[in-house]
Every structure is written in structure tokens, then in C-alpha cells.
């Protein structure tokens, strides 16, 4: 009976994974026009929604941050696909509301769980941020689909902000928190603090730059985020070199860490573009290279490696 139950659970899990991948491929088929086109941002964003978040939420659940997988996920994701296919419009913005509600429910649930324990440990705060930040990204994506321009930003910046909170706001604090819980110490703790400060500081700095105010905020935020991310990247690669990791998990940790290392060095150059413009890539190359490294290299391989580690514990 136990073997049959385990087999059924594995089949259901495999079906969900295939369904998520299939829906994401639908988005790719519609949006693909080359990695340096703005549509690639939507491909990366939907990759977070359909692939990375289901993988990561299993880890959040196993660590007691969220109560479990919402039963309506597939309906929400299907609605998200329909919302994104026509491009920005008032109707697609309404269709996107279920995704905002879905992410908001997860954020509220995780915050309620955190309130019961009131942990101020940087690892716990990072895991909480991973559950909360995507709701901010969902709000910006609703604005993009509705054609709204918060603070006068153009549509591209609105979309990039949504993508920022779906990637840097999810996989980075999640993996930083997992590392800090598994390897507590000053190094991992400071990495978490830098990530927690860096994600909102970057968003604030971009807003300040847009209004011509406090030009030092954006490079400061980028520096904080990069330092925290570099700490995470080094820790990921260190896990890959440990003898406890072998085979595919070891390779996944190494790819994840190396991808994040390269991606964040590119981000540092772009964040310091007003001080040292020669270090910055053009924006289309940034979202093509930096974004792809974060999504496919760091995010996917990192989460797969941590899921393997969690199942062995």
C-alpha cells in the first residue's frame, strides 16, 4: 500500500511538472522573438512563475514558511498565460488579477506564520522575503498589463521591475536563506542581510534615478545586492565542492554558483554605469545575458540541487 501511494504521488508530481513546463512553452512560443527583444523578459518572468516558483515553494513548505501548495495553482497559471498572450491591455490586466491574489495570499500566509515565531534571524527573514517579494512583482505586472505607468516609468521599466521581484525577489533570498540555515555563520548571515537590503534598495535607487534625486542610492543598492549575491554564489560553489555532494547535485551547485557570480558582476557594472560607463552592457544585452543566467543557471540548477539535498535529509 505504501509503495502504491508513493508511486501515485510521484506520478501526480510528474504530471504537475509536465503541465507547468507545457504552459511555459506556450508562452515561449508566442513571445519568442530573440533574447535581446523585450519579449524575452516575459519569457524569463513566466519561467519564474511556471517553473521556479513551484520548485521553490516546495522548499519553503518543507522549512515551514508557507502552509503548502495552493490547490488552484494550475487555474491561476492558465489565466496568467491568457492574460499575457494579447500583450498590455485593460482586459489582460483583469485576467492577471488571479496571479496577484495568488501571490498575495502566499505572502499573507507566510507573514502570519512568521508572526507566531517572530524570528529575527537573517535566514528566516530571507525565506519570508522569498514568499513576500513576488507579490510586489505581481502588482507591477498588473500595472504593465493594464498599461499603467507608476511614477511615470515607461512600459519597459515597469516590466523589468516586475521581473526583478519575480527573480531577485524570489530565488535569491530563498537560496540565501537555505544556505544560512544549512551553514549558519557570519558569512552566510551577512549575505542574507545584504540580499534583504539590496532588493528593495535597487528598486528605490532606480526610482530615485528616474526623478533625478539621490543618485548614490542606485549604485549603493546594487553594491549591497551584488555583495550578498556573491556571498551566495561562493557558498553554492563551496557546497558543490564538498564531498557530501556528488554527481548531479554537485554539478548543479557549481553551475548555479558560477551563473550567479557572472550575472552579478554584470549587474555591478550596469549599476555603476554613471560612474564607470565602460563597465556597463547595453540594456538589451543585460536582460538577455544577466536575466538568462539568473533564471536558467542560478535559479533552476540551484533549486534542483536544494530539492535533492532536502529529500536526503
Image (cartoon, grey):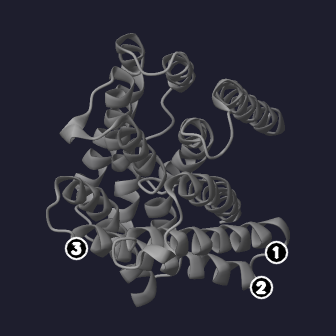
| Residue named by callout 3 | 216
Which residue is the extreme one toward the right? Answer: 247
Quarter of the C terminus within the rendering: bottom right
Lateral position of residue 210 relative to residue 275, left or right: left
Q: Is residue 61 left or right of residue 208?
A: right
Q: State which tag comes first along the sequence, 1 or 3.
A: 3
- Closer-to-camera residue (6/43): 43
210 w.r.t. 30: above or below: below
* Res. 246 mark: 1
Toward the viewer: 271 or 196?
Answer: 271
Query: Marks 3 and 2: which is nearer the front?
Result: 3
Q: x, y percentage for residue 153? A: 27, 41
User: Dots 1 and 2: beta carbons under 8 Å?
Assistant: yes
Residue in the picture at 48% in, 57% down: 63
Q: Which residue is mark 2?
A: 243
| 79 in relation to 172, above or below | above
Amino acid at each position: 500500500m505504501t509503495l502504491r501511494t508513493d508511486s501515485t504521488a510521484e506520478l501526480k508530481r510528474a504530471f504537475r511538472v509536465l503541465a507547468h513546463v507545457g504552459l511555459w512553452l506556450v508562452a515561449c512560443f508566442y513571445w519568442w522573438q530573440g533574447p535581446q527583444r523585450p519579449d524575452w523578459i516575459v519569457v524569463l518572468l513566466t519561467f519564474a512563475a511556471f517553473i521556479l516558483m513551484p520548485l521553490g515553494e516546495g522548499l519553503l513548505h518543507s522549512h515551514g514558511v508557507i502552509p503548502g501548495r495552493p490547490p488552484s495553482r494550475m487555474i491561476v497559471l492558465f489565466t496568467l498565460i491568457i492574460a499575457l498572450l494579447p500583450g498590455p491591455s485593460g482586459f489582460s490586466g483583469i485576467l492577471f488579477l488571479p496571479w496577484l491574489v495568488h501571490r498575495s495570499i502566499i505572502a499573507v500566509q507566510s507573514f502570519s506564520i512568521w508572526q507566531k515565531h517572530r524570528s529575527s534571524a537573517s535566514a528566516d527573514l530571507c525565506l519570508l522575503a522569498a514568499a513576500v517579494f513576488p507579490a510586489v512583482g505581481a502588482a507591477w505586472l498588473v500595472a504593465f498589463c493594464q498599461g499603467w505607468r507608476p511614477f511615470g516609468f515607461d512600459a519597459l521599466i515597469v516590466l523589468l521591475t516586475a521581473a526583478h521581484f519575480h527573480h531577485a525577489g524570489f530565488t535569491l533570498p530563498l537560496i540565501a536563506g537555505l544556505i544560512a540555515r544549512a551553514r549558519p555563520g557570519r558569512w552566510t548571515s551577512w549575505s542574507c542581510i545584504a540580499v534583504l537590503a539590496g532588493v528593495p534598495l535597487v528598486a528605490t535607487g532606480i526610482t530615485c534615478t528616474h526623478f533625478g534625486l539621490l543618485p548614490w542610492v542606485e549604485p549603493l543598492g546594487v553594491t549591497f545586492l551584488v555583495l550578498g549575491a556573491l556571498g551566495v554564489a561562493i557558498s553554492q560553489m563551496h557546497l558543490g565542492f564538498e564531498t557530501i555532494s556528488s554527481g548531479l547535485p554537485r554539478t548543479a551547485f557549481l553551475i548555479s554558483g558560477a551563473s550567479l557570480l557572472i550575472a552579478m558582476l554584470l549587474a555591478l557594472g550596469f549599476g555603476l554605469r554613471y560612474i564607470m560607463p565602460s563597465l556597463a552592457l547595453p540594456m538589451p544585452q543585460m536582460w538577455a545575458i544577466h536575466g538568462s543566467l539568473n533564471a536558467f543557471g542560478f535559479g533552476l540548477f540551484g533549486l534542483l540541487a536544494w530539492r535533492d539535498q532536502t529529500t536526503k535529509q
